[in-house]
Image (cartoon, rainbow, N blue to C red):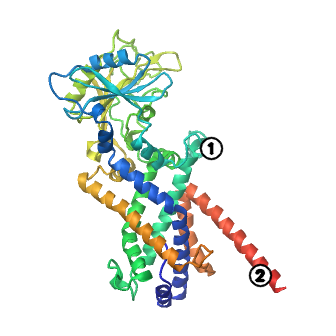
């Protein structure tokens, strides 16, 4: 929806009151500029999105010998598999393990090498043989995942003021990758592109018959305009959805939104039998740093501690019957339970096949005592909202400390996670993937038709930018929408202010030159 046929434009504007016609011209210009800014990025997001959408079959085609095994014989215990991995790679640190979700698939151990580089080690669970390793941060799928959210190398960063630091207890500045900043800005312009395009497509007196049926018989610019409008209206709706559901994962906006959601509609930590964890207990989201896939909605949850219950020794009771969290915790038992026992406990708790197990993290409290972490078992991600879930198991007894699922999440978190899973193509199964695939195809069709119209209408040596309207009321109407959008998405708002400043300088120079010419 980047341009419109001039004859039709004049006709439609003549049918509207002057202010609406001026608004139409303003949005046409905005639509063109937004398309010019994000067109290459849209194509890239469509390509990388398709790769991410079909990541599993792509991985299996590329590395079938690592992912697939012959399902014959009895399975070797996870502890024996872990010993085989440690024997093959003694310098690797254990991060998590994902037992096979199907009988003919291998076990995946997420490890970190001596340099902290992530490594996936694959083991045949029937023989205990280590099949080999892959770097999850390399390859086509990893490249698509990385560049889908950051279009520049990740070492380029910049500090940005944090709303959580200004109004909450977080840091005043947050270090963000410049590539992710660019993606957030592009996402904001994507909303402008979609909203302005939908407005221009909206049925008018002489265009109601051409909503979805292009004028193929006329050919030329009218045909390309209708093709662009018909595909663009579907793409515009999809683009709004993708931006709104994708930004919760953005480093800056997503973290700010997560902090707000945690305050407004906090998750219910119903697994706590005591008043709460010490302040330095790790959060579930910390596991994402080691490659474990964590639902967006549970990243702010704290991991419970192992080693006791309401009447556990070492935890003093205050006079009012509450627990004194500053007291020394119970001493750790002699041994930690094995992975196989945790695996069986997770199965008994009906965790879904393909769940991942992360080892406990122990922390030292301010008073020098130790808080013993718990095993975290996470259902496969991405998956539908109803299949999300976490299980927390005592590291000394494998007893269940608590569970967390969509029912324990706050309302904002549930809605956001529903959008994320739909964005990932997992919420509604095969139909979800088909629809997303069609949207990606619409990107190609819409951009191709926009390019064709642009090449046909622009004068040689110019960009063919629509002329700037000068009506104040039109600017005021568009400005109100822009201010609201800028408040919600501040990085986009900053980019819009920069462009407005550049536009003002260009207009001022042209006006000055015209005045000098008259003299």
Q: Nearer the viewer, residue 404 or 77?
A: 77
* Residue 224 quadrant: bottom left
- Residue at the top extreme of this rendering: 334
* Residue 58 quadrant: top left
Q: Quadrant of the N terminus?
A: bottom left
Q: Where 513 sits versus 184, above or below?
A: below
Question: Which mark is on residue 159?
Answer: 1
Q: Nearer the viewer, residue 335 or 47?
A: 47
- Distance between the alpha carbons at the discs numbered 1 and 2: 42 Å
Total residue callouts: 2
Q: Residues within 10 Å of mark 1 (few under 14, many from 20)?
A: few
- Residue at the right extreme of this rendering: 519
Q: In the figure, is residue 133 to the left or right of 106? A: right
Pointer 1 or 2: first along the chain: 1
- Residue 44 visible in the snapshot: yes
Q: Which residue is at 31% across, 31% downward?
A: 356
Q: Which residue is at 40% across, 85% downward?
A: 204
Q: Which residue is at 26% across, 42% downward?
A: 387
Question: Which mark is on residue 514?
Answer: 2
Q: Position of residue 197 (x, y in %)?
A: 45, 72
Q: Quadrant of the C terminus?
A: bottom right
Q: Secondary structure at mark 2?
A: helix
Q: Which residue is at 73% across, 76% downward?
A: 510
Q: Nearer the viewer, residue 202 or 415?
A: 202
Q: Position of residue 13 (x, y in %)?
A: 50, 87
1 vs 2, front mark: 2
Q: Secondary structure at mark 1?
A: strand
């Amino acid at each position: 929806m980047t341009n419109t046929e001039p004859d039709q434009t004049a006709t439609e504007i003549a049918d509207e009151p002057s202010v609406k016609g001026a608004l139409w011209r303003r949005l046409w210009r905005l639509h063109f500029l937004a398309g010019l800014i994000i067109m290459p990025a849209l194509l890239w997001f469509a390509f990388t999105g398709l790769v991410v959408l079909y990541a599993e079959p792509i991985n299996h085609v590329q590395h079938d010998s690592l992912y697939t095994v012959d399902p014959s014989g009895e399975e070797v215990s996870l502890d024996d598999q872990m010993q085989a991995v440690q024997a093959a790679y003694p310098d690797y640190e254990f991060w998590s393990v994902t037992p096979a979700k199907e009988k003919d698939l291998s076990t995946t151990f997420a490890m970190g090498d001596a340099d902290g580089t992530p490594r996936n080690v694959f083991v045949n669970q029937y023989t205990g043989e280590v099949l080999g390793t892959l770097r999850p941060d390399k390859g086509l799928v990893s490249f698509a995942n990385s560049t889908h959210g950051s279009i520049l190398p990740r070492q380029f960063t910049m500090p940005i003021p944090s709303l959580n630091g200004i109004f909450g207890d977080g840091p005043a500045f947050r270090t963000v990758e410049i590539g992710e900043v660019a993606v957030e800005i592009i996402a904001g312009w994507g909303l402008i592109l979609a909203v302005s395009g939908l407005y221009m497509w909206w049925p008018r007196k002489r265009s109601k018959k051409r909503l979805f049926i292009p004028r193929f018989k006329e050919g030329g610019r009218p045909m390309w305009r209708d093709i662009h409008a018909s595909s663009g209206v579907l793409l515009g709706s999809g683009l709004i959805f993708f931006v709104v559901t994708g930004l919760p994962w953005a480093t800056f906006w997503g973290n700010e939104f997560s902090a707000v959601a945690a305050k407004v509609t906090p998750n219910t930590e119903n697994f706590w039998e005591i008043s709460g964890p010490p302040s330095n207990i790790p959060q579930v989201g910390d596991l994402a740093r080691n490659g474990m896939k964590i639902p967006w909605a549970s990243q702010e949850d704290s991991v419970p501690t192992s080693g006791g219950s309401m009447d556990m020794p070492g935890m003093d009771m205050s006079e009012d019957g509450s627990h004194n969290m500053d007291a020394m915790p119970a001493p750790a038992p002699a041994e930690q339970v094995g992975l196989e026992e945790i695996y069986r406990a997770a199965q008994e708790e009906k965790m879904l096949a393909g769940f991942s197990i992360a080892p406990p993290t122990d922390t030292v409290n301010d008073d020098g005592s130790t808080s013993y972490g718990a095993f975290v078992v996470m259902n496969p991600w991405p998956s539908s909202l109803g299949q999300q879930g976490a299980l927390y198991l005592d590291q000394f007894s494998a007893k269940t400390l608590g569970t967390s699922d969509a029912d324990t999440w706050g309302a904002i978190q549930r809605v956001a996670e529903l959008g994320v899973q739909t964005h990932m193509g997992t919420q509604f199964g095969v139909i979800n993937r088909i629809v997303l695939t069609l949207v990606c195809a619409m990107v190609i069709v819409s951009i191709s038709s926009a390019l064709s119209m642009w090449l046909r209408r622009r004068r040689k040596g110019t960009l063919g930018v629509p002329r700037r309207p000068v009506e104040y009321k039109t600017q005021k109407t568009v400005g109100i929408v822009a201010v609201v959008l800028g408040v919600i998405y501040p990085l986009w708002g900053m980019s819009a202010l920069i462009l407005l400043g550049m536009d003002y300088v260009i207009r001022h120079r042209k006006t000055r030159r015209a005045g000098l010419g008259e003299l």
